[in-house]
Amino acid sequence: MNNAPETPGEQADETYDVIVIGGGPVGENAADRASRTGLSVALVESELVGGECSYWACMPSKVLLRAGTVRALARDTPGLADPGAPDVAAVLARRNEITSDWDDSGQVSWVEGAGLTLVRGHGRLAGERLVEVTLPTADGAGGSSASGAGAGAGSDAGSGSDGDDEDAGGGLAEAETGEAPRTKLLRARHAVIAATGSVPVLPDTPGLAAASPWSSREATGAEAIPESLVVVGGGVVGVEMANAYTDLGAQVTLLSRGGLLSNAEPFAGEMVAESLRAAGVDVRTGVGVASVDRPGTGTDNEPAGPVTVTLSDGGTVTAAEILVATGRVPRTTDLNVESVGLDASSLGRGGALVVNESLEVVGVPGGWLYACGDVTGRAPTTHQGKYQGRIVGDVVAARYGTEAGDRSPTSGDPEPAVGQEGKPWSRYAATADHGARVQVVFTRPQVSWVGPTEREARAAGIPVEAVSYDLSWMAGASVDGPNYTGRAQVLVDTQRRVLVGATFVGPDAGEMLHAATIAVVGEVPLDRLWHAVPAYPTVSEVWIRFLESYGL
């Protein structure tokens, strides 16, 4: 901490050059990059350092999916026997290992090693360059209260959270102790970066809130696998958890008002639906939830027993647990944006902080407030949020840092002035948020894509031609196994003769994506791509088939 004289205004308890609110992967990246030109940086976090992705989303969910994926691979490989149903206890033990048993000491060591200052507690804006932190109590309320699964609603896989949705403001601490929570006022000399993530949306369905529904946190952190599970929502979380819980022995019903994976190409959702049904999932699309009922027992009338879901078509589904995965919204309701002159009319969809291409918050005079990750509403995934964290960290480091040596991340690239945006594709502009966003869904088969779908591209006025190919026809696919199923599609801008999008569905489709991402970001001409030779026999030879199908 740098104890330079305070600027005029309310006296602060501590002063730093930069304050980052939210210690998830997005906030960590922003803080690390911002510190690389000599700036002092405070990282404010009220739960676990490392955020949602490390403890309740990306990492544990993939562990839950892995055993079923390997079993399917063994079944489809001639010469190997079916290893049988997964050992659930071993899978959950591995999940606990990958989350470090919800202990963030390793991440805290990284923060300290990077020269950052960790401030435990819930951070909220308190005026120009001011952040008020509600400090944790002795029992953890109002601060880093999460010590295990199901600790409450936090940010999604796309960003780190600075607390859970219920007690992050310190109200729980006051209710439990009978005293007002302790607070600390931090001042930033130069910049505050909001990386507060997002929170789950719970539909206003009769009986749902009283039924103790699971969010993704409870699903990834469960201590046992229920006999049956009804999943509401056909997005990424919904399909992944339907796949995982079926693999681990639950009878799963998946409900979706539309098709599955509506943000992907239609064929991707259709192939996932077919695979889930083959695995035993009762997939019902085009149906909504009318009401939910769960009986209460005991003196507190707490929900107990099975959940009964009444559907919009009049049918019912009964299960031991219900997982609601119907979307998330940017977490700004407990950020106190009003203190810096923002109101509902200043915010974007779902309450997002509106930012320019250099991630400076629009509508806040002085150019001192920045945001990255889910809270911006731009691209709600961990990887895109981390990308934004790197961008905004470099912007802040360049604008305010004093140690810009040859090896600094800002060397040789003039930064934009405050209030101005960086040039597209410079280190100071998050250009990839628009035409090169990437997504991977770890179902079986996996789904991955970069850029717009064909429908989105045409709606944006891009003249595209879709080129599709059956991946099972590739020599590499036949080596993988006789039951290989997959499909890939690229979108060619017919005027510029470059790729603008690509989708892959099949085993390990996520590992095939980055080549397409490079082609899209680099705007590599098709004539040059022709000289990128894929190895034989790999499924990546589909790149030759794409180009030949297009006419090369």
Image (cartoon, rainbow, N blue to C red):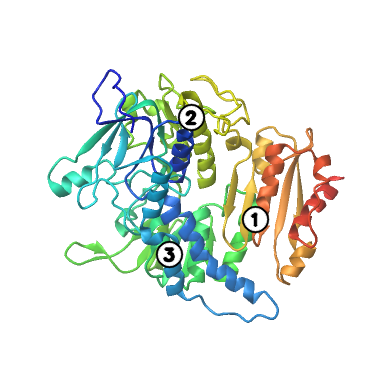
Q: Is residue 325 visible?
A: no
- Mark on residue 374? none
> Which quadrant of the figure has residue 306?
bottom left
Q: CA distance from mark 1 to mark 2?
A: 33 Å
- For this view, does 381 lie left or right of residue 112? right
Q: Position of residue 51 (x, y in %)?
A: 41, 49
Q: Is residue 252 above or below residue 259?
A: below
Residue at label 2? 397
Q: In the current view of this chain or complex, which residue is farthest to the right?
A: 552
> Which quadrant of the figure has residue 272?
bottom right
Residue at 73% across / 37% down in the picture? 523
Q: Nearer the viewer, mark 3 or mark 2?
A: 2
Residue at 37% across / 56% down in the picture? 291
The kind of residue on which mark 1 rests is: Glu
Q: Is residue 314 above or below residue 166?
A: below
Q: Does dot 1 land on a helix, a strand or a loop?
A: helix
Which one is earlier in the sequence, the residue at label 1 or at label 2?
Answer: 2
- Camera-nearest residue between 230 and 173: 173
Q: Is residue 397 above or below residue 487?
A: above
Classify 10 Å Cα crowding around label 3: few (below 14), some (14-19), many (20 and above).
few
Residue at label 1? 511
Classify 10 Å Cα crowding around label 1: few (below 14), some (14-19), many (20 and above).
few
The kind of residue on which mark 3 rests is: Glu
Q: Position of residue 61 (x, y in %)?
A: 48, 60
Q: CA distance from mark 3 to mark 2?
A: 35 Å
- Camera-nearest residue between 93 and 299: 93
